[in-house]
Image (tube, rainbow, N blue to C red):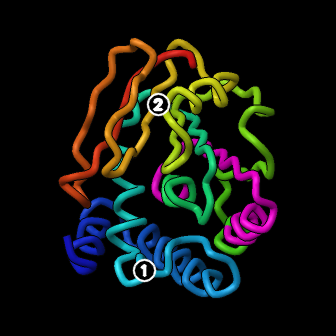
Amino acid sequence: MTEDDARAWMADRYDKEVTDRVASFVDMVMAENAVQNLVSPSSIASIWVRHVVDSAQLIDFAPASARSWTDVGTGGGFPGMIVALCWSGAVTMVEPRKLRAAFLQHCVDRLGIDNAAIIAGKIEAVRSPTDVITARAVASVEKLLHAAGGCATPNTRWILPRGRSPVDEVGGRLFHVEQSITDPASSIVTFDGVG
């Protein structure tokens, strides 16, 4: 997938207002990346593929009934900010690094994202049931299940991009491994239930 393909993929799925807001967010990330390392500098040239579409594709794995989404370790806003910009439900982004959390809050305020909330802290301290939990490049699945367990219910859908890493043990749970549309060698693990 090229950058043009990624922009076209977004434009096919979302209206101009959404794609314009996503583009504004991408501009903010690129500007801020000079101040703090939000994404790998080597991924800037492919930001629409590696970060935008890689995040937006996760929405397809959410249950149709989902109304709340918690993104653990949001970092530079992926996938949390993209989900908040493209999805109508409530999105909570949990980011322990204060400078990154402040940047995310600035983006939410500047872009007027009224369905997003930022928590500057660790997921272990959050006790708020949610319909979807995502975490991109955060810990092993087992550690994440333990850390974010306070947000899970029996119906929570976990959507965990694992990149090219092998899928580790998921505690004996039934899980699905989906192929990422941005990189055929990358996987997305999905399963339901309590951590």
Q: Is residue 135 above or below residue 107?
A: above
34, above or below 173, in the image = below
Q: Is residue 39 left or right of residue 62?
A: right
- Amino acid type of the residue tagged 1 in the rendering: Ser
Mark seen at residue 131: none
Residue position marked by numbered label 1 in the rendering? 42
Quadrant the C terminus occupies:
top right
Q: Is residue 143 left or right of residue 41?
A: right
Residue toward you, 1 or 132: 1
Report the span colored magenta: 84-107
Q: Residue at x 23, y 58 (%)?
A: 183
Q: Secondary structure at mark 2?
A: strand
**Quick one: label 2, few (<14), some, or many (20+) residues within 10 Å?**
many
Indicate the position of residue 74 as horizontal and vertical percent values: 61, 54
Is 70 magenta? The answer is no
The residue under the point 52% across, 44% down is 135
Residue that mark 2 sits on: 158
> Which of disc 2 and disc 1 is earlier in sequence?
1
Contact between labelled residues 2 and 1, with CB atoms less than 8 Å apart: no
User: Measuring 58% from the left and 77% from the top, which residue is drawn there?
Assistant: 29
> In the rendered image of this protein, does residue 10 appear above or below residue 133?
below
Expressed as whole percent of the image width and height from the top left, the position of residue 149 reads 64, 23
- Nearer to me, 83 or 99: 99
